[in-house]
Amino acid sequence: MFAYLVRRLALMVVTLVGISIVIFFLLRIVPGNIVDILFAAAGYVDPAEKANLERELGIDQPLVVQYLHWIGGLLRGDLGFSYVSEKPALEEILPRIPITARLAGLALLFSTSIGIPLGVISAVRQGTRLDYALRVVSLSGLSLPSFWLGLLILTASVSMFGTMPIFNPNPRDFWEAFATYAVPAAAVGFRSAALTMRITRSSMLEVLRQDYIRTARAKGASEASVNFHHALKNAILPVITVVGIEAAFLIGGLIVTETVFNIPGVARFLVEAIRWRDYPIVQNLVMFIAVVVVVANFTVDMLYAVFDPRIRYTD
Amino acid sequence: MSAIEYETELRRAGVGATQGWRRAFYLAQRHVLGAAGLIIMSVFVLTAVFADFLARFDPLTVDSAHALAGPSWQHWMGTDSFGRDVFSRIIHGARISLAVGIGSTALGSSIGVIVGLASGYLSGWVDLMFQRITDVLQALPLLVLALVMTAALGPSLPNVIIAIAIPLIPTVSRVIRANTLALREQPFVEAAKSIGMSEMRIALRHVLPNTMAPLIVLATAQLGSTILTEASLSFLGLGIPEPYPSWGRMLSESAAEYIRTAPWLVIFPGVAISLAVFGTNLFGDALRDVLDPRQRG
Amino acid sequence: MRSVRALAVVAAFSVFAVSNIALAGEPKQGGILRMYHRDSPGSASIHEGATYSLNVPFMPVFNNLVLYKQDVPQNSMNSIVPDLAESWAWSADNKKLTFKLRQGVKWHDGKPFTAADVKCTFDMLMGKSQQKFRQNPRKAWYSEVNDLTTNGDFEVSFNLKRPQPSLLALLASGYTPVYPCHVSPGDMRTNPIGTGPFKFVEFKANESIKLTRNPDYWKKGRPYLDGIELTIITNRSTAILAFVAGKFDMTFPTEVTIPLVKDVKTQAPNAICEITPTNVSTNIIVNSSSPPFDNQDIRRAMALALDRKAFTSILFEGQADIGGTMLPAPAGLWAMPKEMLETVPGYGPDVNANREEARKLMQKAGYGPDKRLAVKISTRNISIYRDPAVILIDQLKSIYIDGELDVVETANWFPKVARKDFTLGLNLTGNAVDDPDQSFFENYSCGSERNYTNYCNKEIEKLFDEQSQETNIEKRKKLVWEIDKKLQEDVARPIIFHSRMGSCWQPYVKGITMMVNSSYNGYRYEDVWLDK
């Protein structure tokens, strides 16, 4: 077990180094840099000013030097400065994280609190009309473009209530704050609730076919006790994995949702930073997301290893 | 239930292997949702193939006299701000969406298969390397990767296909690798090895065909999400450029301006995307039931 | 006749502006003006950018030497008023412009404002100082200025190489604030210090920009507002929905398209919306240094094929202006009269006849229905660029040209254009000041950085200088018309149309005046107040 842990940790570091290389070089393959963009915005190019600016930002140096400079800084906790705002990258990224985290947390909450019960019901009532209806709803949840859903929600809200939930950094009260997070969270959560429901359902179905469930039933345990106590408990493990993976997918959904609902979180910030070729922001933000994803996966795997003795520790 | 079990069940129901139509009918009855999905998908594919015959107008011709006209007999789904017929654009858009969907799924899956097979079959350092690359790709959010890729390659149809395909590779290669690992221990592979078949041939002749079922299931499931990814990219301004009538572009451009003044511009492309993705999802679900018993739900 | 009509319109505009204030009653103090901003500007330094995304939020932080009077919609020499300068005077030979400066003005950090600050600002703009701007897009504006001299703390003179009456117009633009000597260009990008009615509070990239009232503002009783808050919303539909839902007092100026103005008016009938010319022209940049457009016939054919009415009716429901380089009347001051404009190839009213002629020219060049010319039309990946390109492609079909759209990401656009790696490009040109000096020298003079087509005609170049030195306005106008006509006939950079855009605000927002011949100069906001 200990050897497995060490091995997994080592692989995690390798993966993170790999990610840093991929994102660093991928970004620099993207044509144009911050200097091109700044001059594009100004509508002219002055080669001397351009060269100066590139030197000032250090993007005239060889790529390997730039890479080592970045990693060196990262290890010392120095993330560099945003090219656009000229503020420390950390100062730009840090305040935006809680906003996205809250949104993602609410979306996950929404997704599990709706997805899991519906998944269980759907599995227990397999083949009934209810099951069909739930499956169709969940599939449609996976079929709607999320920005479209978001815009329809906003438009409907303005048409029906004359107002809409838009992000306010200083909400008047709890309810305003709740509304500005809950509505976009629901828009993202709808999709992941559909996913959760589907996984729960198939996982439940598999468990329900197992011998011990038959045994429990034969022993006269009540239907509810069988479904929720015995079956769900065993079916939940794959669901947890998926919820863990979903956290990574959620970021994709959040990019679009934060744009539609104008929420100043990290996801939208990342897109803007890509647009501006603000390397320090993009690199560090992607690394941050990668760390979150990798650690989440690692934790899920560890939980698995602890709770499920069937896991082999060799892979 | 595996494919073989299905055969027995079909036979028990009195449907012989030769009676193609009755077989199909039986399957459709058992999987109403899947059949519905198949119908939607077929409509979608046929629309794409016969777009030139179905469209009532040229999807690119600008007509200032009829800009932003609502739905009518002349223009079934109205016209956009350039006076282009929305119905014809949606019909032709099916082609683009299908190209993106099938193109990127096929590309992503084929690379995934190669990586997965190599990784699972060759093991050793090849496996270790491919596995790490997969880890790296998986830790980057799909849309972020696609965003950087399209920015890097520039907006065009082939580039969007590539950008969407790459994030698909890890999922496919993971599944194929796991399958290959399991298959490698199977007696028929051992047997092939003992009669002196080359590794390459074993991989291609025996292992690959046996991983097809999960691959097809996975690919169908991803078809829908690639279409949605293209729409999201378009929304963020990096999808397929004008003048191609991509659904994602039609939706995201018009949604910004005309959501209330000309709602038909927002509703029809949105419905087209949702329906197409819904159809592939329904079909994919049924396919999974039939082909991949372990994942059945 | 024409000038009479123009006068009438100008008068109507001013009456409107005056009545706007007169009806509003006594201005009230207090309140925060909430606006949305269309995008996140790259920095907070007006001198280092060339987009009014910078002027709108940061003009209120500064003062100029002189300024276009903020409640007169049409910028002209007559509407220039003192700002940090109390008065100005030209020397007898028209080569020296002297400003007497206001005394007792303080920068937001408490330091006193003096003539040295003015000299610093313009030395830096001319690239003569030790400290340099990262980017200096309007250096060319001061090409005729030799140097600046100060006389004590409160007098400064611009010494010119030759007379240039328009210099004053350039100094009155929102693009020409006076910067403090004691703050570095880098600090001005992140934490601007001005003398203006509002102090900079914070700028969170992609999120918001906040300004607060400057209690020590030198103009007594101003500003009325306690502050201005701009929330950055890049998604246009979200922004408009939020305005309609009452989350904002005002939209971003000249950013509401004509269909959206209609939408706002139905959703929020009380909102006040004005559609004004932006002095941004949409034009075609032609690469005349390589085939096929090195052929004068093909260039002319293309110019003849344009149906400008179709462009404006599709993109602006007819509410845009057709003209040459200079902004068309009545809003514009320097445009050719209509009769003169119609003699330029492609501007005649009969589109079919024009196209017939164009097809003949194409046939002369060896093209026809069976031998069509395939060209790429490059443009930026932004809808205001892309949309006209789609129409252009459609129109060129009629003269045997098959255009293919080549969409270029913003970051690659200028490098591509600079490399001459295009055949036809669709481009937007914004004019900060409705003045020929700004537009001609910047876009058409040999060697100018913004002369994307490298059009270079020494004869016209002489006329540029001649008009620039002319102090008699009527004589200058005649010259300008002649130049503009020649530029269009040469197909140097065919102008398709001059756009108009809407701006909306809630009925309780008072004291807003939208400028009709520039979208860069009207955002000081010291006279804006909220009636609630």
Image: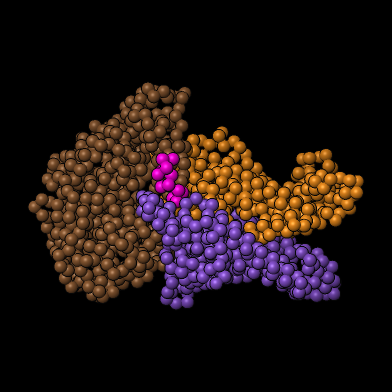
Q: Is residue A29 above or below residue C204?
A: above
Q: Is residue C530 above or below residue A59?
A: below
- Locate the N terminus of chain B by quadrant: bottom right
Instruction: Identify the colour of chain B in the image.
Output: orange
Q: Residue at x 31, y 43 (%)?
A: C447
Q: Front-most of C108 and A53?
A: A53
Q: Residue at x 32, y 38 (%)?
A: C455
Q: Residue C413 in the image: state x and y as whole percent.
A: 43, 47
Picture quarter containing residue C290? top left
Q: Is residue A176 left or right of residue B178?
A: left
| Chain the render paints purple | A
Q: Which SS type dominates the magenta stretch?
A: helix
Q: Residue B264 in the image: state x and y as whole percent.
A: 47, 48
Instruction: Identify the colour of chain C in the image.
Output: brown
Most distant residue in the bottom direction: A173
Q: Front-most of B36 and C379?
A: C379
Picture quarter containing residue A5? bottom right
Most distant residue in the left direction: C92
Q: Residue at x 43, y 70 (%)?
A: A168
Q: From this viewpoint, is residue C56 visible?
A: no
- Locate the C terminus of chain B by quadrant: bottom right
Region of the chain picked out in magenta, as a range: C409-421
Q: Residue at x 46, y 24 (%)?
A: C371
Q: Is residue A74 left or right of residue C152?
A: right
- Does residue B5 show up magenta in the picture? no
Q: Front-most of C381 and A200?
A: C381
